[in-house]
Amino acid sequence: MLTFWGDRQRYCDNISRRNFLRIGAFGAGLTLADVLRLRAAQNPVTPAKSTPQKAAIMIYLPGGPSHIDMYDLKPEAPKEFRGEFKPIQTNVPGVQICEHMPLQARMWDKLACVRSLISTEEHSDSLVSTGYSEVANRISSHPAFGSVISKLRGDSGNDVPPFVSLRGGGSPGTEPGYLGVGHRPFTPSGAGVENLRLANGVNASRMDDRKDLLGKFDTARREIDASGTMKGMDSFAGRAFDMIASGIVRKALDLKNEDPKTRDRYKGVEQFLTARRLVEAGVGCVTLSYGGWDTHTSNFKELKQMLPALDRGIANLIQDLHDRGMQDDVVTVVWGEFGRTPKINSSDAGRDHWAPVMSALVAGGGLKMGQMIGSTSAKGEYPKERPYKVPHLLSTIYSAMGIDPSFTFPNGAGRPMYILDDRDKVEELL
């Protein structure tokens, strides 16, 4: 196994979380064939009604984006709360968002926002990715959203993994919990794409020859392994070969295959384009993260830089999905772990963590768009109308994908575990 480490991401708790990529493995010593084998072994037949046919793109904004400066501006609040940004009208009457997100404003009929979400004070993606806090996951180890998709899709026979993370691994948002390592995401990044490339001088014909050769080795190994414990070339190794030889995922990850004009539209936010290409290729869930939103200092200076790029990534992704007729087949969610303090820090123009309320952007999946759901108090401190919890939005997304959030899986001890314990839904979206 090779491990490639990416850039460090340092948060206000001074803990450095470094992205990493495991080449040729999803866990210690696991090959691609091992993962396919584990996934099949861990996949009993599930009811058809719980098999997801739609796809999801989960966009995580690490650090906690400022709700009051993006989707819940308070122009009438006192100066120390309202901040520097002005609201602008969207193409839906009565709905306003930040002036630094004009592209979303022009397509709000294709978007919706829940601005009355209640979160928890944790610098972690655990809650928004699993529906359970990090504290709860230390006890029960609930699976990430994409791992649930992987479990329910099972071994579909497609030459694409059901769950791809463009974020690397090592966080609750990418961990399979009690579902097992067979449902970890495929995590391509940089040189990791080489994992899907045929070696120099190896064409499809030579690949078939190598499969045959491995099969012969396997026959020999079985003859000398009377106990039957040595596992050689099997259907799962064959699937691994097929996934590499087909090149479907690699082609999706290679943006050189995209129209240059389209690439230009995504300049600086290429992960959004990659996510679109992956769901087009048949991936069931794609996760990515963008930016660093832990703006304890220089909140407005930082947001002036980040919001226009985020706006471009979101707008191009959603418009592309519509142009391809995929808007009802792909649900997209954009959120962080919590909001920011409505009252601005007087010394450094920053905003601190604020779990009592946050906002989340939603698009597609057959959900009702063109809405601003819920409201907050006059200073943006607490939910006022239609308060929801983070698991309620996850429950809504699962339902939109045809998954019953009350479905159960056995944990390591054989105890049945609900996908979500808190299964209320954001009714306005349904």
Image: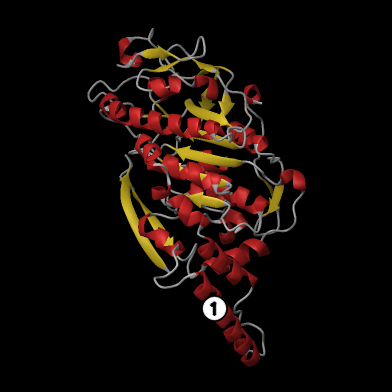
What element does badge 1 sit on?
helix
In this view, the residue in front, 7 or 312, is: 312
Residue at the limit of the structure toward the top, as seen here: 76
Going 38% across and 23% down the picture, which residue do you hit? 101
Task: Tell me the quarter of the picture where residue 308 sits.
Answer: top left
Residue assigned mark 1:
209
**Measured along the vertical axis of the image, is residue 316 above or below residue 231?**
above
Give the percent coordinates (x, y) of residue 344: 31, 20
**Measured along the vertical axis of the image, is residue 121 above or below residue 27?**
above
Give the percent coordinates (x, y) of residue 283: 56, 49
Task: Tell me the quarter of the picture where residue 201 sits.
Answer: bottom left
Q: Amino acid at mark 1?
A: Asp
In this view, the residue in front, 218 or 403, is: 218
Give the percent coordinates (x, y) of residue 412: 64, 59
How many marks can you see? 1
Task: Tell me the quarter of the picture where residue 195 sits.
Answer: bottom left
Going 44% across and 49% down the picture, which residue do you hit? 166
Going 39% across and 30% down the picture, which residue do you hit? 312
**Quadrant location of the N terminus?**
bottom left
**Measured along the vertical axis of the image, is residue 196 above or below residue 417?**
below
Q: Residues within 10 Å of mark 1 (few under 14, many from 20)?
A: few
Q: Is residue 238 visible?
A: yes
